[in-house]
Image: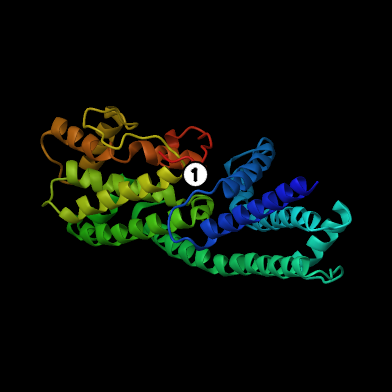
Amino acid sequence: MIFLRSLVFLCGILIVALTVLSAVRTFVLPRSAPDPLTRSVFLFVRALFDLRLRWAKNYRDKDRLMAFYAPISILALLPAWLALVALGYIGMYWALGASSWLEAYKISGSSLLTLGVVTTTSFPMTFLEFTEATIGLLLVALLIAYLPTMYAAFQRREAAVTMLEVRAGSPPSAIEMILRYHRLHGLESLGEQWRTWEAWFVDVQESHTSLAALVFFRSPRPDHSWVTAAGAVLDAAALTRSTVDIPTDVQADLCIRAGYLALRHIADFFAVPYNADPQKSDPISVTRQEFEAACERLAVQDVPLKPDRQQSWEDFVGWRVNYDTVLIALAGLTMAPAAPWSSDRAQAYQFKPFSRRR
């Protein structure tokens, strides 16, 4: 019997320790650290949402429903953690001499929620009561402190996404972005946008890997998405570098590199497979016919194009191949609204275990 109680006590300590570690990984650790418990909660909530999505009539209904997915998943983390902490302490209270499992349950619940309705007299169990109450308060405090940080990052992301509608239309289009700059500002002014979006990609990479739930926070408007905005900017930079006949701007190169690195790091967190060293000969989701149609549309509006169309296509593929796979996968994963050359070709993406790294 002593051996059994000792084993239960150790199991209780392990459960509490792993739960606290899960909270630290999710809320405190300032880097990408996939956690199995957080993953399980998000997957469970997503399964419930998928059941409801079967009755959605159109995309707007789906978007309205999925807007609640990330917030509810985050709030569900707290009761999941509290339940596991309570479970671990129930085992420890029983191992230290609680008269029954029911009595251990009452002591644990009273201590965790700081109700004080059930108390003990022995020093070891009193010590456990204080530690359990402290852990419960810390978990609640972490969640409260976590939300403002998340929403600050969300607002920074969405400010740029909303501004892009003025420059690239809705849904955002790389071709429309180039046309509007050609008509209103001049193509030389694109360099300012490449700098702005390079900084945006860096911010998104940092925030969406350390605060992974942000990936599923949907834009305030159903036709906006951070994924489709990223795709439009990257395609505009790739077309500018490969096809539009203007002086070379290395800032476009830096923007593309910052963009595909950001998307790849986010894809790593969700175990999205991709080729880390793609070649220009690798296939992309944009067809040659779509590329030719884009060139014709640009030419009709008097946008200067490079004369060698074959070379332009090869150069465009060389840029696009760096982010094509991860862009399409993230568009499917987040259920992004339809946008040209990104979510319009994204199949429903199957959730991958985000505790398993590439």
Residue 144 percent across, percent down from the top left: 61, 68
Residue furthest to the front: 2
The color scheme shown is: rainbow
In the image, 27 versus 52, the foreground residue is 27
Q: Quadrant of residue 296?
A: top left
Q: Residues within 10 Å of mark 1 (few under 14, many from 20)?
A: many
Q: Going 66% across and 58% down the picture, which residue do you hit?
A: 78
Q: Quadrant of residue 118?
A: bottom right
Say if residue 339 shows up in the picture. yes
The residue beneath circle 1 is 337
What SS does tag 1 mark? loop
Q: Quadrant of residue 288?
A: top left
Amino acid under label 1?
Pro
Residue 158 percent across, percent down from the top left: 45, 60
- Left or right: 307 with respect to 277? left
In the image, 272 versus 282, the foreground residue is 272
- From what the image shows, is residue 325 above or below residue 237? above
- Left or right: 356 with respect to 286? right
Q: Going 69% across and 68% down the picture, which residue do you hit?
A: 131
Q: Going 44% across and 42% down the picture, which residue do you hit?
A: 330
Look at the image and tell me in which quarter the C terminus lies: top left
Residue 297 percent across, percent down from the top left: 26, 39
- From what the image shows, is residue 27 above or below residue 325? below
In the image, 49 versus 11, the foreground residue is 11
Residue 181 percent across, percent down from the top left: 25, 56
Say if residue 171 shows up in the picture. no
